[in-house]
Image: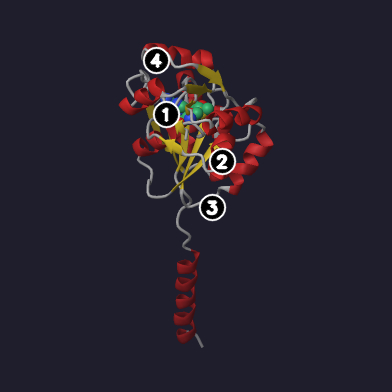
């Protein structure tokens, strides 16, 4: 039977593709790409001539049937997106779910992915984290989403577009407060790779003051909410009251 391969592609540096990814792309029967023109350049760079077809957000639901049919006929199909790991803020979820339901083998190759790369280099706690993908574009919905995350103890990770980063940072400061730890990772694996880290307010001010920091591809990360110490505070207060009671008439 066929197999659906999820093949990660570089997120900025063409050297960040694995040998196995290249082999799978060369040997499979067809490549489903988010944008065939964009991926055409990548394939050309590696001398890969496998036929491609488009599978993107807007046609995924219609296309899935055809892809499933090909897989059931025994074809090997590779899914790639414009950059990084397919399905991570990229198309493929509908296809993979259906393959799983129908018992069609799916094999995800490890490789480049912005969220994990940014987190590892951030200096924020890595033991527990929450990936939130892109925030809603509309200001009201964005603030609401952020508010829902205020008490989240795990490190928070967002993808953000350069033309919204200033507005988002302003919302972060007003919702999470000026001192919440914040790291902005930009242009990972590329010439202008940058990590800015500091308090939410510091990052907001740095990005506002330097338009270069509002360019390129961005991962925004926040430290989790500080551990809830209200129980400790309450028991300390009760102890004080007990001491006072003994002393007072
Ligand atoms: N599937 C991709 C992955 O594995 O990371 C993510 C695709 S999503 C449509 C694109 C977003 O990922 C960008 O807007 C940015 O937030 C983030 N991103 C991708 N490449 C990046 C890079 N080189 N540096 C920083 N962020 C990046």
Q: Nearer the viewer, residue 37 or 213?
A: 37
Residue at (60% x, 27% y) in the render: 66
Alpha-carbon distance for marks 1 and 4?
A: 15 Å
Ligand 1 has an atom within 8 Å of the beta carbon of the residue at disc 1: yes
Q: Quick check: 217 above or below 1?
A: above
Q: Which residue is mark 1?
A: 8
**Circle 4 sits in a helix, a strand or a loop, which is it?**
loop
**Circle 2 sits in a helix, a strand or a loop, which is it?**
helix
Pinpoint residue 47: horizontal percent, then vertical percent.
37, 12
- Mark 1 neighbour class, 10 Å CA radius: few under 14, some 14 to 19, many 20 or more: many
User: In front: mark 1 or mark 4?
Assistant: 4
Alpha-carbon distance for marks 3 and 2?
A: 32 Å
User: In front: mark 3 or mark 2?
Assistant: 2
Q: Earlier in the sequence, mark 2 or mark 1?
A: 1
Q: Residue furthest bottom?
A: 249
Q: Quick check: 161 above or below 227?
A: above
Asked if residue 160 shows in the view, the reply is no
Ligand 1 has an atom within 8 Å of the beta carbon of the residue at disc 4: no
- Mark 3 neighbour class, 10 Å CA radius: few under 14, some 14 to 19, many 20 or more: some
Q: Which mark is residue 182?
A: none
Q: Earlier in the sequence, mark 1 or mark 3?
A: 1
């Amino acid at each position: 039977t066929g197999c659906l391969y999820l093949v990660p592609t570089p997120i900025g540096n063409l050297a960040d593709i694995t040998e196995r990814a290249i082999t799978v792309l060369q040997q499979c029967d067809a490549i489903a790409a988010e944008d065939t023109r964009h991926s055409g350049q990548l394939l050309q760079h590696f001398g890969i001539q496998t036929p491609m077809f488009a599978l993107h957000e807007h046609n995924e639901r219609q296309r899935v049937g055809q892809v499933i049919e090909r897989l059931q006929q025994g074809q090997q199909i590779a899914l790639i997106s414009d950059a990084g790991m397919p399905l991570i803020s990229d198309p493929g979820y509908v296809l993979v779910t259906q393959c799983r339901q129908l018992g069609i083998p799916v094999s995800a190759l490890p490789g480049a992915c912005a969220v994990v790369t940014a987190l590892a280099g951030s200096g924020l706690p890595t033991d527990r984290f929450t990936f939130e993908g892109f925030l809603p574009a509309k200001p009201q919905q964005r603030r609401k989403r952020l508010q829902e995350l205020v008490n989240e103890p795990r490190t928070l990770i967002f993808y953000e577009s350069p033309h919204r980063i200033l507005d988002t940072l302003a919302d972060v400061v007003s919702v999470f407060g000026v001192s919440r730890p914040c790291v902005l990772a930009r242009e990972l694996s590329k010439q202008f790779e940058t990590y800015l880290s500091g308090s939410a307010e510091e990052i907001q001010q740095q990005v506002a003051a330097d338009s270069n920091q509002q360019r390129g591809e961005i991962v925004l990360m926040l430290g989790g909410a500080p551990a809830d110490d209200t129980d400790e505070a309450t028991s300390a207060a009760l102890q004080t009251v007990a001491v006072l009671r003994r002393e007072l008439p």
